[in-house]
Amino acid sequence: MSEQTTSQIAYKYWDEITEGEALPRVEMPVPFERVILDAAATQDYFPGHHNPAYAQHQGQKNIYLNTMAIEGFIDRVATDWAGPHTFIRKRSMNMRASIYAGDTMVGEGTVEKHYEQEGRKLVDLSILISTQAGPCVPAQLTLELPCK
Amino acid sequence: MAEEFNVPFPLEYGTYEDALKMIEVRGERKYAEFTVNWEMIKVYCAMEEDANPSYWDEEYATKQWGGIVAPPGLLLTWGMALQWHPNKDREHYFVAMKVPLPGDTLINVATSTEFHRHLFLGDRLSAVDRLIEVSEEKKTRLGVGHFLTTEAEFFNQKDELIAVTTNNMFRYYVPEDKVPEDKVPEESAPEEKAPEENS
């Protein structure tokens, strides 16, 4: 399994990245199963993530993904592009709209800055997570990457 | 109504003044229930459909990092309380869930994390967090309540700093006269717009 999986993985090196470069779009459907799997995988049983009646009481349309699920998807958009040798130094995100059961989420990103700091080779990305309803979660990441 | 939903895991109720008293009170260090384990990493990566071999491939991860590492997005999970324990009451791990306020529900709004080092299989996380700010009452499209800003530091069992997180959460109630969003006429003036809202 490892050989096959690893051979499909892309590896980006710091010295081959340019500012303005676009990251490949990542799309993932969010059926009810994934929202429930999210609650279980992250041990977050806040009722908005598994109880539709509670989510509606909160003013939400349906049960929705939690912060950790969105964080992991943002990170995946970055590391699917940059490769598993990436160390995520910083991630900031604003959750402006919920991602509900039944939605499809899409992650897109751009290289904003390519620089060195305290001996580290860094890249700043802006990533936007959207659904069919529009933008949901803008995020900023700082990645540390090796040179070729 | 929400109180009924929350019975197994209630929030603290009180006034804005009660909440302000909690500002800058540094919490005790709390130790995670779960040690970092490969099974939970795999379940999380299956949820994300994340094929990163740092989480799946022992040979690759050992060569790259010295072992399988935990995805950064699982940081908060290691400390989550079990639903039942023979000797302990179920307790919220983070101070944000324990702030006394009128709102009967909450939603996370924004979060920012700086990562200093990886967590490896077998590591045991601990955290210290504190409440930094409580906003005055605000009205947003979801309801009426207060924004809470908290900061948490996470350490491994060697007392090495793993990550520092700043989080912003909205603790609110939905006013009884609130018209459901899909019934609000297009031309009606919005209330004060929420800076941002979600999970």
Image (cartoon, rainbow, N blue to C red):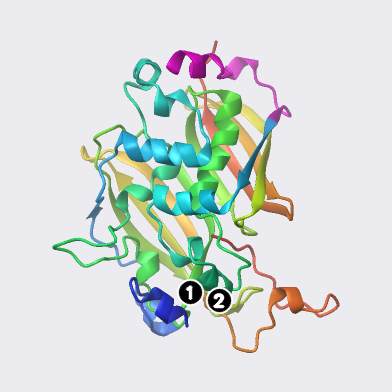
Q: Quadrant of the N terminus of chain A?
A: top left
The residue lying furthest to the top in this view is A148
Q: Position of residue B185 (x, y in %)?
A: 82, 79
Q: Residue at x 37, y 22 (%)?
A: B65
Q: Quadrant of the C terminus of chain A?
A: top right
Q: Position of residue B186 (x, y in %)?
A: 84, 75
Question: What chain does badge 1 belong to?
Answer: B
* Residue marked by disc 1: B105
Instruction: Give, as a single range, the part of the protein colored magenta.
Output: A1-23
Q: Position of residue A103 (x, y in %)?
A: 66, 52
Front: mark 2 or 1: 2
Q: Is residue B145 magenta?
A: no
Q: Is residue A14 magenta?
A: yes
Q: Residue at x 39, y 74 (%)?
A: B6
Q: Is residue A35 above or below residue A52?
A: above
How many residues crowd mark 2 within 10 Å: few (<14), some (14–19), many (20+)?
A: some
